[in-house]
Image: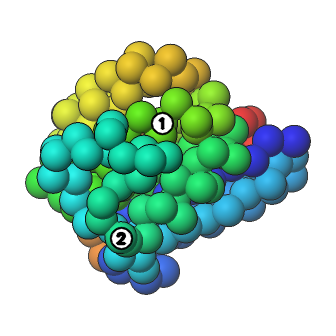
Amino acid sequence: MSKILVLTGSVRKHGNTDTLAEAFAEGAKKHHEVEILSVADLNVNPCIGCNSCFERENHACFQDDDMSAIYEKLKETDILIIASPVYFYGVSAQIKAVIDRFHTPMRNEFSIKKLGLILVGAASLPNLFDSIIVQYRMAIDFFHLEDAGMVLARNAKDKGDVLKTDAVIEARGFGERI
């Protein structure tokens, strides 16, 4: 049994991203311990690139915010799933702030072995997710992680739109297979 942490980056409560994250968790809970954490509910400041974490005791960031709690969870997480709406061909600002804060020597203490991705976009463009997938694959390479898989949902603008597609079934299946 692995520990899975799903970080959701949508500010829209019970929206499409949350729906897919919950479907994933429902499938994954059959074999794993799963926690969903909405980073939109937390106070995580963006990284300012000062690199003081490389010099500070325990590599702590000088910013006293909720990222320290996320770091602690990542030290015990085997599989990390990033779930985000697509905002102008990128992940949400809330999830991006968390990702940027992985720029710390503390990342060497993370126990993550696999990384997965759940994305929800309003458009139907064939290349809607391309720029995010490039960043995702680069992160996998950098951290030497296994690609756990992806669910990519298009045409989901309004709350509940993912319920009109196969995305919920895909997300649940993704969780079951992981």
* Identity of the residue drawn at 58% across and 38% down: 110
* 135 sits to left or right of 22: left
Residue 64, numbered label: 2
**Residue 123 occupies quadrant:** bottom left
Residue 149 in view (yes/no): no
Closest to the observer: 123 or 62?
62
Query: Label 1: few (<14), some or many (≥20) within 10 Å?
Result: some
Which quarter of the picture shows residue 103?
Answer: top left
Please, what is the three-letter code of the amino acid marked with disc 2? Asp
Left or right? Give the position of 14 relative to 139.
right
Quadrant containing the N terminus in the rendered view: top right
Q: Residue at x 69, y 47 (%)?
A: 76
Query: Is label 1 in a helix, a strand or a loop?
Result: helix
Residues 87 and 143: in front is: 143
Q: Is residue 176 visible?
A: yes
Q: Earlier in the sequence, mark 2 or mark 1?
A: 2
Q: Amino acid at mark 1?
A: Arg
Quadrant in the picture for the C terminus: top right
Look at the picture and state if 21 lies above or below 18. Answer: above
In this rendering, the answer to whether 94 lies above or below 86 is: below
Question: Viewer-nearest of labels 2 and 1?
Answer: 2
Viewer-side residue, 71 vs 138:
71
Q: Residue at x 52, y 38 (%)?
A: 116
Residue 108 relative to residue 85: left or right = right
The answer to whether marks 2 and 1 mark residues whose Cβ atoms lie closer than 8 Å is: no
- The residue depicted at 35 percent of the width and 55 percent of the height is 61
| Residue 150 percent across, percent down from the top left | 49, 37
Q: Position of residue 155 (x, y in %)?
A: 30, 58
- What residue would you read off at disc 1? 107
